[in-house]
Image: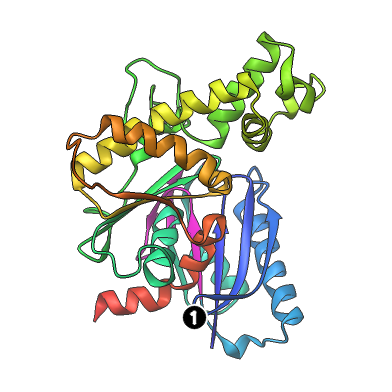
Amino acid sequence: MYQIGLDIGATNTRIAIVDNGEVIRSKIIPTLSGRTIQEIVDDDAASIGALMKDASISLSEIEAIGVGVPGAVDRINGTILHAYNLQWFNVPLAQELKKKIDKPVFVENDANCAALAELAKGVFQGKRNAFLLTLSTGLGSSMILDGKLFSGRKGTGVEMGHVTIREGGITCTCGNKGCLEAYCSASALEREGRRAVIDQPYGQLYNAVKGDFKQVNAKHIMDCAKKGDAISLDIVHRFADTLGSAIASIINLMDPEIVAIGGSLSKSGEFLLASLRENVKKKVFFKNMVTANIEVSKFGSEGGAIGASLLAQYRESEDS
Ligand SMILES: [Zn+2]
């Protein structure tokens, strides 16, 4: 039997046919989140159908569909309670998807899905306590506590991205000011990059987008920083400084064995990690002790879809 994993992000949706954690086929389509839920689900169902056809897999061979979304979910009803980056509030996602494909549908926060993928097949295997930060459009987070996914009383934890780090700071997508996500996410990097292109019209970043600030994305900044561009390096260092404080706080709070970085920014790999490790080392409370390893997640931006595909199996194990 196969499983379908969907990771609905603010920008893109990744759809994968998975065989017990191994991706058989996958594709990425734009989410275009301003549309109605029916339009979005229609697109997702059509892409699932096309992938199944491509892999010669019939509906009878599909066990279940799992969906990861960047927000809080009611996992009993499969409803999205709120996903600010998608502007979805009380969206009956499982119900709508089931109308199109008659299979059990499980819904979970996307970062929680990514942690399940790491726990089952990635860098959290065999770990009792671990923390994952997924850096994409927003900043997702998830926690493995005593070998199990921890998601709080109602399942809306863990939202490290919305911990206030600067009183009266930049307004976040959630409406609060000074959230970590407003400083440490791909959108935050882009905002800083765009500002730099406007304020400092020279250097590699400016040249990479030919002076058009609207073209700046997080990859431009990371690539230019790797090449030694002073303006981009300054942006990345400020980013690593804030994220380093957050990771040191996580380590002080829960003493995990590992803190992993996932999401699209994890592609920067060792370049970002080296800066983060150095930063965290200076800030942790227990200075001369071995603290958590800081590593790139195994599955990176694929983790959400892979973890979503494992939801049926995980929920069953939780219930037993
Ligand atoms: Zn926030």
Image x and y of residue 287, in percent = 20, 35
Residue 294 versus residue 172: which sits nearer the camera? 294
Stretch of the chain drawn in magenta: 65-87
Residue 262 versus residue 35: which sits nearer the camera? 262
Image x and y of residue 315, in percent = 34, 74
Image x and y of residue 245, in percent = 33, 30
Q: Residue at x 67, y 86 (%)?
A: 57
In the orientation shown, which residue stands out farthest toward the right? 210
Q: Residue at x 82, y 23 (%)?
A: 210
Total marks placed:
1
Please indicate whether residue 75 sits to the left or right of residue 15 in the image.
left
Label 1 crowd (10 A; few <14 / some 14-19 / many >=20): some
Residue 144, compared with residue 207, is above or below; it is below
Image x and y of residue 193, in percent = 63, 23
Residue 202 versus residue 84: which sits nearer the camera? 202
Residue 238 versus residue 74: which sits nearer the camera? 238
Give the secondary structure at mark 1.
loop
Q: Residue at x 35, y 63 (%)?
A: 124
Q: Which amino acid lies under the numbered mark 1 shown in the image of this protein?
A: Asn
Looking at the rendered image, the quarter that the C terminus falls into is bottom left
Task: Determine if residue 85 is in view.
Answer: no
Residue 205, compared with residue 168, is above or below; it is below
Which color scheme is applied? rainbow
Q: Is residue 86 magenta?
A: yes
Q: Is residue 204 magenta?
A: no
Residue designated by label 1 = 20
